[in-house]
Image: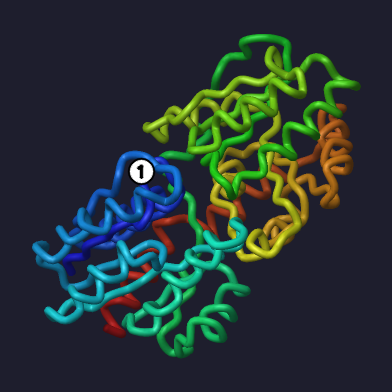
Amino acid sequence: MKIAILSSLAMDTGCWLRAQYLGKSLEKAGNEIVYIKPMKKTMHFMLDLFLSFFKNFKLLFVKADIAIGIKPYPNATIPLLIKKLFGSKVVIDIDDLDYGYRKGLISLISKFIQKPFPKFFDVVTYHNNNLRKFIVNDLYVSNEKLYKLDQGVDFDLFDFEKYRPKKYSKKKILVYAGHLNIASNLDDILEAFKIVLKKRDDIKLIVTGGGPMENYFKKIAKKLKLNDKVSFTGFIPQTQKIVEYISRADICLVYYKDNLPNRYRCSMKLREYLAMKKIVVCNKVGDLKEFKRFTYQSNNSVEDFAKKILEVLNNKTDERAEIGRNFVLKKYSWDIIGRKFSKKLQGNL
């Protein structure tokens, strides 16, 4: 099959990463993949969605048996549904409840422009059981159109055997990797890190990744007087470089505020940390709870999160990182996810 894939959001987002990982896995399963490349960077006031609306009409000039969009914004859904009129089967992937991160008019607009379209697609994919309920009850998509497309890991990239870095200093390295946008909870991680520093001075936090709120988080770090203890890498276009930073970590961090949209998320970075056999400290919101056996979990307050980091720094660890890697290898490899999804597309469309 020839499959076209487009991302609603820009190249510096997890949306585009998911599109690429999905495409690579479907290609390994024997399909021909064409990408409709998005805007290079996220813009303020969601301007990139408007500009990419016209850019995504390139899809209409691509011959494809199936066309897949990531996130149901009109810049993806409208070109996809027009493509359907010309005979292609169409799929839309809904990977979070992103309008919930915003407030007021912008939140209402974000919800309004996504809501009308999914029910017209041949297949609607999701990765979180809470999302399934939302898609059925709020977007009026019938159950027979739904398919669970898990959040996966590319084990060709996230292979700890390829990265065995030398220890550059005696400091303990903590790593937070992510897109620094409105969905990032780095502000709470910085607060927790400040608490940890009162007990342990031999630590450094590396924040890998950029995004529209990078300067905002830098200002928080400065306000907390963390300048010499926190490093921001900025946007890293090569995933291999991100993997190198993760490989240097003594501890990797994930923290979700206990709010509605975070209960609809699945953490890509948590799975990738575990693939690298890393010690992970996280809290218990959303799908993070499903990884209790493989991570060091705190309650949901910043103070409890800091306390758990300190416990791990004081060597209260066991073999769960290795067990976690085996778990994600068996359940969340993109190779496995792609083969299963390819069979679904061949058999049901």
Q: Quadrant of the C terminus?
A: bottom left
Residue 96 image offset from top left, x and y in percent: 54, 63
Q: Using the rendered view, name the quadrant where residue 317 is placed.
A: top right
Residue 5 image offset from top left, x and y in percent: 27, 60
348 in relation to 34, above or below: below
Q: Using the rendered view, name the quadrant where residue 6 is placed.
A: bottom left
131 in relation to 309, above or below: below
134 in relation to 69, above or below: below
Q: Which residue is mark 1?
A: 11
Foreground residue, 324 or 38? 38
| Local crowd size for mark 1, using a 10 Å CA cut-off: few (<14), some (14–19), many (≥20) | some
Q: Quadrant of the N terminus?
A: bottom left
- Per the image, label 1 sits on a secondary structure element best described as loop
Residue at 63%, 62% (x, y): give it.
261
Residue 20 image offset from top left, x and y in percent: 34, 51
Residue at 70%, 37% (x, y): give it.
187
Q: Number of labelled discs?
A: 1
35 in relation to 68, above or below: above
Residue at 69%, 62% (x, y): give it.
286
Farthest-out residue, top: 169
Three-letter amino acid code of the residue under disc 1: Met
Foreground residue, 92 or 106? 106
